[in-house]
Image (spheres, rainbow, N blue to C red):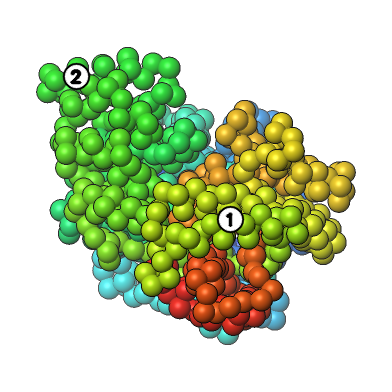
Amino acid sequence: MLNQIAYPTSLEYSSDWDSQPIEFYIRAIPHCKRIDLKLGYFSSNAIRTLSYGFAQFIFNGGILRIITNHYLSEKDKSILVNDEQAEYKSAMMKKIIEEDLSGLQELLKNGDQHFFDCLRYLYNNERLIIVPVKLKPGKLSHYKQGILDDGKHQVFFSGSCNFTYNGILENGESLSISRSWGDSPEKMRIEEHIKDFDSIFSKTNSKFEYLEVDDIIEVIKEKGQDKELYQLVEDEINVLKKINNKERLNQLYSSQIDEFEKKVYEYKNTPRFPYPSGPRDYQKGAYEAWLANDYKGVFAMATGTGKTITSLNCLLELYKTTGKYQALILVPTNDLQVQWVGEVENFNIHNVITVGVDRDWKKRLSKLTTSMQFGTPKSFVVISTYASFVRNALQNFLRYFPKEALLIADEAHNIAAPEVKKLLPTTHLEKRIGLSATPKRIYDPEGTDEMNLFFNDEPPYTYEYSMEEAIAKGVLCQYEYYPHLVPLDADEMEAYKEITLKLVRFFDSESGSFSDPEAANMLLMKRKRIIHKASYKLEVFKDIVKKEFDKRGNLKYTFVYVPEGFDSENEDDRLMMYYNKIVKDIDPSIRVSSFTGETKGREATLDAFENGDIDVLSAMKCLDEGVDVPRTELAIFCSSTGNPRQFIQRRGRILRTHDDKDRATIHDLVVIPTSEQIDKGSASYKMERSIVRSELRRVADFAYLAINQKDAVRKVEDLCIQYELDLFEIKESIK
């Protein structure tokens, strides 16, 4: 705290006294929560001395506010960015260079750059406020003043502006201070200055003309380098070591360096939330709800809203309480294992074992469980697929895991899959989180009940965060939705009708179900394949791609969900090839890449798409669960699905936010074959109506959250009238 620092009785510092200004900066700045500065010039010289202790200030969450009455011209920018050369031109600096060139160079190299790196860090994390001003009628004042605030106490300082190397360490630099806990004159002085600073930051002080800040920010971004917080602290250690040339300051420097190095070590080895702003309110709410439900529950959160981070924040909170992290994370695919490793490491969590991916995972788990058997608590995170979870190789290790370890089940509906479900009664980990955008198991109500029982939860779940809420709060981006009704050709329609007539024999119009579900299901699959491979899809797709290319001038960041399977005439040709060819025919310069289960270097492919090295990425259902494609701006769904889990997850992939993306566009190919003449009293009509209603579930869910809701709904109005369907009612039934 600022009130615990030993200050000179005179409350003054000078570089030719025992109480030196640099000692004030080094001792006081690390304790601050906020620093307000008033500078005559926003230049390297004016702020260089503040480099010492500044990374610690940032480490403690400090906020910096700067008032500067210097407006940056092009010449000023040049001086600021290359301040070293400007200094060399002055006669006074020539003398200093002759006396101590190496000292000056090191100070410029380290202190100056370090401070701008700190400024950039503060700017990137929205903890920097700069207000450029000039005194009316335009004259400038040269001063350096500041208020240091530790959250309870304040110190005001006013200093000279001689910031040369010798001025800092030899002579010419001086400052006086006032303390908020001092005598009456000190208190009055600091109160007046606080009012003055606040009036300028609020732009209510009529003595000043307020200027644009863009030029200064431009310099900070140009001169400062993006660095991690621990790197800033390490740089600060180096800065202190470079100026450690005064015997009477050795002890101060040494103790400060020791303290900084300890902080670096702690920072590198302490789990923390990956973003300086901390968890969002809804993520905090999820943890509190989970805590209230005895460390169990399902987080039913829309795809793209940060389910992974929300669950890892719960693990982080457990670490804060127990001093260790212990978790088993289950995921559906190897791709998700890799993705989870990245998310876990972002929390600065180490000792991550990836089952089946790490070559030595068995050896590492053996060493870990052996230490547990001898009562040695260890921190760890084990990430496994559900397929690996059910095998004896992993189960033999899991029995030694402490019951207090946290089980996180990603895409939690998989927990009730037949093979996994058998192990649930013997799973002893008591703390549990299930993650899913769609927890309900389609066509498996018993499995849904098993999942709910395992997580001690039921709808409404422990924590729910809908897509509608996520879009409204900017967690997911807004989107435009364009459904395209696609007909069947003559041959497809004939085959479709033939199967339909067979289906009618099994359809009970009273109950709306099939008398022989197994036989009906085989016929339904045949009909689905006809819809899946509908030839007119290619024509509609070509029209969409051509129009989007003409409108945008390119097809960058385009994602296509293509139908699975092969051409019926040539089993060697995937349907995907036809879609890719259509894109290439639009313009040969368009870079297209496929993403399938057999794709090698899948992570590199996604990175290339993210970076714009691939324009169009075409994929099948392998991206349904968990894999991120946040850069997607244009999506075309050519693969029909009435499964809410699939279409909700697919949309969530597209709506993930990105700094360079304000909205997404979704085109959806909907194949709904209809007869020219409809007998509304027939069994075939009732069956057909049921199937059309199922196909429109996706359209309803997509349309009502879209920016262009009315236009999207209007596209299917005639179809709804034809089959006496209410699109809004269909949407509500999905819930």
- Please determine whether, in this image, residue 735 is positioned above or below residue 21: below
Secondary structure, mark 1, is helix
User: Number of numbered discs present?
Assistant: 2
Please tell me whether mark 2 sits on a helix, a strand or a loop: helix
User: Which label sits on residue 433?
Assistant: none
Mark 2 or 1: the one toward you: 1
In this rendered view, identify the residue nearer to me: 164 or 680: 680
- Residue 587: percent from left, percent from top: 87, 48
Q: Residue at x 27, y 73 (%)?
A: 184
Q: Residue at x 23, y 21 (%)?
A: 396
- Please tell me in which quadrant of the rendered image residue 247 appears: top left
Q: Residue 3's image quarter?
A: bottom left
Residue 352 appears in the rendering: no
* Position of residue 571 measured from the top left corner of the image (x, y, whole percent): 70, 33
Q: Residue at x 41, y 39 (%)?
A: 332
In this view of the protein, which residue sits in the foreground, 329 or 722?
Answer: 722
- On the image, numbered disc 2 is attached to which residue? 371
User: Disc 2 residue type?
Assistant: Ser
Q: Disc number at residue 499?
A: 1
Q: Residues within 10 Å of mark 2 (few under 14, many from 20)?
A: some
Tell me if residue 284 comes above or below residue 163 in the rendering.
below
Q: Amino acid at mark 1?
A: Ile
Disc 2 and disc 1: Cα gap in Å? Answer: 62 Å
